[in-house]
Image (spheres, grey):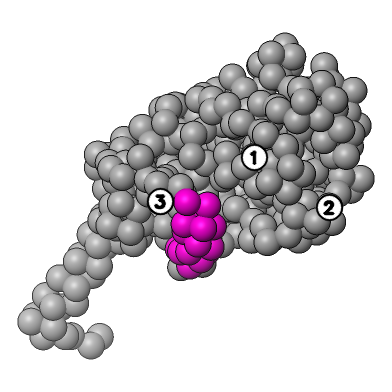
């Protein structure tokens, strides 16, 4: 039997124990007992439905309890501020689309957070497009029908709901009005759910929001999506034309959905969550559900999501500046 000198045994043992402690510590960091998914909009809207679809599967992949926490208000600003104040330990993530991360800092002077300074991109999972939908109280079946109806019923004046003030949908309302020479005014809501409630009650005749916000009621015949943004028609709505087809080009850069964490969150935690998310959106039932909501499902790494966010922000910074809008 070969005998090793005691110092060599001691060094090997110390190395093994240190490695084990490091690995166990990293695992503990990556698997907190409870994970909160912050959502900046009320229950019942498209973003909330997406969050709950993912949370149900993430709990198994993360080995943690995963809860959806709605911090509605100010277009996601309240949720973003909550993320900034949260501990950077992997217990809190923010599921957000473009508005809160890319647009709010362009239209609000002091939103209470700076994405580049306060947050880290974790992973993205989908892109989507915004759409114009009309309520069941209008006879319009197409974009041209809607334009003709506004001209006849309101002498060219109309009100269009949007899920948040100073949002991409609000700017789109202005641009649609300019294109068709209509006096369209945006009516901001605290999320898509209350906007949809007013559309279903025919309190408002049209709305601009994401396809996930409209899709179920569109399929039920309660509202009608008449045009979508993006470079191509959407698989979930093959019969609905794009605005580019209708002559309103320049909005082919589609928005995104992704997760963000407080700055300083350990890389091991981010990687663990990212890997779990990649597995979840690869599940056939999850992919089918998200696609049915009108999303284009596709995984984006931390670096890819961060790059997409910067590019989207730059695109809309130019559009917002050209519109003459001043940050409030």
Can residue 46 be seen from the camera position used here? Answer: yes
- In this picture, residue 29 sits left or right of residue 156: left
Q: Earlier in the sequence, mark 1 or mark 3?
A: 3
Q: Which residues are magenta?
A: 306-324
Which mark, residue 173?
Answer: 1
- Camera-near label (2 vs 3) is 2
Which residue in the protein does label 2 denote?
A: 246
Residue under the image location 31 percent in, 35 percent down: 82
285 lies above or below 122: above
Which residue in the protein does label 3 denote?
A: 106
Label 2 – label 3 distance at C-alpha: 28 Å
Q: Secondary structure at mark 2?
A: loop
Which mark, residue 253?
Answer: none
- Camera-near label (1 vs 3) is 1
Magenta part, dominant SS = helix
Q: Earlier in the sequence, mark 1 or mark 2?
A: 1
Label 1 – label 2 distance at C-alpha: 15 Å
The count of marks equals 3
**Are the residues flagged by discs 1 and 3 in contact, CB closer than 8 Å?**
no
Q: Secondary structure at mark 3?
A: helix
Quadrant hosting residue 110: top left
Residue 318 screen position, x and y as percent: 50, 62
For the residue carrying disc 2, how many other residues have a C-alpha within 10 Å: few (<14), some (14-19), or many (20+)? few
Residue under the image location 23 percent in, 59 percent down: 21
Residue 170 screen position, x and y as percent: 57, 39
Residue under the image location 69 percent in, 13 percent down: 203
Label 1 – label 3 distance at C-alpha: 18 Å
Magenta-colored stretch includes residue 312: yes
Give the camera-side residue of 314 and 60.
Answer: 314
């Amino acid at each position: 039997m070969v005998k090793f000198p005691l110092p060599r045994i001691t060094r090997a043992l110390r190395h093994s124990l240190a490695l084990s402690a490091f690995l166990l510590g990293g695992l503990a960091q990556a698997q907190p007992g409870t994970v909160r998914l912050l959502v900046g909009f009320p229950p019942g809207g498209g973003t909330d439905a997406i969050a709950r679809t993912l949370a149900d599967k993430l709990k198994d992949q993360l080995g943690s309890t995963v809860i959806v926490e709605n911090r509605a208000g100010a277009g996601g600003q309240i949720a973003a501020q909550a993320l900034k104040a949260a501990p950077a330990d992997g217990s809190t993530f923010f599921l957000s689309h473009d508005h809160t991360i890319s647009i709010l800092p362009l239209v609000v002077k002091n939103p209470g957070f700076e994405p580049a300074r306060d947050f880290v991109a974790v992973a993205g999972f989908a892109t989507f497009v915004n759409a114009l939908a009309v309520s069941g109280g209008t006879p319009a079946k197409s974009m041209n029908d809607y334009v003709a109806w506004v001209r006849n019923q309101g002498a060219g004046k109309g009100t269009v709901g949007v899920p948040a003030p100073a949002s991409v949908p609000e700017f789109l309302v202005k641009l649609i009005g300019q294109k068709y020479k209509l006096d369209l005014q945006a009516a901001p809501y605290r999320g898509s759910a209350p906007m949809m409630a007013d559309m279903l009650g025919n309190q408002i005749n049209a709305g601009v929001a994401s396809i996930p916000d409209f899709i179920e009621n569109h399929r039920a015949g309660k509202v009608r999506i008449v045009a979508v943004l993006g470079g191509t028609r959407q698989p979930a709505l093959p019969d609905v034309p794009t605005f580019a087809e209708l002559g309103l080009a320049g909005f082919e850069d589609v928005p995104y959905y992704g997760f963000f964490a407080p700055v300083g969150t350990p890389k091991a935690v981010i990687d663990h969550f990212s890997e779990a998310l990649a597995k979840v959106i690869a599940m056939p039932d999850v992919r089918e559900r998200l696609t049915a909501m009108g999303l284009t499902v596709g995984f984006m790494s931390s670096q890819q999501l961060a790059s997409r966010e910067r590019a989207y922000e730059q695109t809309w910074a130019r559009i917002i500046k050209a519109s003459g809008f001043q940050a409030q």
